[in-house]
Amino acid sequence: MKRDDFLKHVAWTGSGIAWSLSSGGLFNAQKALAADGAISFVQISDSHIGFARPENMDVTGTLQKTIAAINAMPVQPTFVVHTGDVTHLSKPTQFDTAKQILGTLKAPLVVLPGEHDVIGTSAAFFDAFRRSDAPKGWFSWDQGGAHFLSLVNVFNFEIDGKLGTEQIDFVEKDLAAQKSSTPIVVFAHVPLYALFPPWGWTTEDGSRVLAALRRFNAVTVLNGHIHQIVQHTDGNIRFATAASTAYPQPAPGTADKPGPLKVPDSKLLSVLGYRSVEIARNTATIADHSLQT
Amino acid sequence: MAHQSGDGSSGICTHMSRLFLALQGALLSAALTAGASAAAPPLLPSVATVHIKDFKYHPPALTVHVGERVTFINDDDEAHTVTATDKSFDSEGLDTGGTWQHVFTKPGTYNYFCELHPYMKATIVVLPAAPAQ
């Protein structure tokens, strides 16, 4: 079995088996157990509230199903991060609906915008999810021995996947104050590396941020945007894009264009899901869970 | 967003909490559906129509005159926008089947793109109004 196949298989078992990246860069299947002193969080992404097409006529329902599954986790995550495209068309009514549903989470919520959340203006997004500690949208914090960075790469008017000089300066300064032994976790909507540029699945100016991440022992970069799980390792940096809670998209290059992918109705829940991450002893353990029960 | 219960509230007698959750979901869905299916304003006469299909604008280049109206229709499965590089016009998000019309009032060459997929680009050239015959 090729390694890619193995990862895909393991990623979707959803039964508590997870894979992790050891310092040697090897993936190991292991039981995801809550360890003392560990921090755990959950990532959800790309809910596209307002979307109502044959690919998923009930995106509110699948988001509610996701929240219910997270709320039922025996050990509640320290927080839940939504990595963007909360709404489909940035409409205030769509943000209202999303807030109502996300408000039922038991754990605290962190939300960053996707390009679908800032169409024309970012005002509706900030009205819904403004944080006093993130006036520009990006911010960082320390929790459970790890350092977290929540970035925004959808604010450029003409380029999706751009951080901008001001934000990169912030990241460089922020990381300079961290010890290289501290586990670093970075969130952004669009993948920070060149995952598939022909479809815009890249961050044009991501390289300066990746360069600033090189000296750390363990870095985990979690993105959304592409509605599917893709794992990638580059030296000390481990990248993982997340499944959507709304609909899948084609694998890179397997279709003429990106966009909603129709799967048989009976299969939809198996390609939607959420991700749990546990950080213990400087190792991040990721487990992707589908909504299929 | 108004959440009208309509006559969907009949029959609630047992399992209140479960029903409440189900009802809440149904109301959210109903509200969304209502929002999505709100009747689009009728289209006014226009001199040209740009169709958005397969992540492209058709035609990619178009010439019109000052005072003329152009219709944009999103025929794609994905949402798109019609956004001028100089920000002089912006459709904002157009869902599948969504339409938007714009009257060009100043001569010039207008490059536009999709804010959601910025590699989608097209141009409209606006010529001075044709002299009255």
Image (cartoon, grey):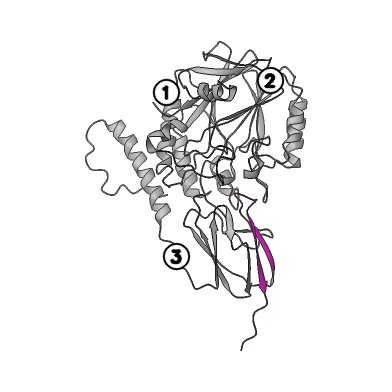
Of label 2 and label 1, which has the lower sequence position?
1
Q: Amino acid at mark 1?
A: Ala
Residue that sits furthest to the top in the current view: A36
- Residue drawn where x is 73% and y is 33% of the image: A209
Q: Is residue B69 above or below residue A147?
A: below
- The quarter of the picture where residue A168 lies is top right
Above or below, A270 relative to B124: above
Which mark, residue A72?
1
Residue situated furthest front in the rendering: A1
Query: On the picture, is B108 further left or further right than B89?
Result: right
- Is A67 above or below relative to A23? below
As measured in the structure, the alpha-carbon distance from the residue carrying label 2 to the one carrying label 1 is 29 Å
State the extent of the magenta-drawn residues as a range: B109-133
Counting the numbered discs, the total is: 3
Circles 1 and 3 on the same chain: no
B37 or A105: nearer the viewer? B37
Viewport quadrant of the N terminus of chain A: top right
Mark 1 Cα-neighbour bin, 10 Å: few <14, some 14–19, many ≥20: few
User: For residue B41, which numbered disc appears in the image?
Assistant: 3
| Amino acid type, residue under disc 2 in the picture | Ala
Look at the image and say whether residue A114 sits in the magenta stretch.
no
Query: Of the residues tagged 2 and 1, which is closer to the observer?
Result: 2
- Protein chain holding label 2: A
Q: Chain of mark 3?
A: B
Where's residue A241, x and y in %? Answer: 58, 32
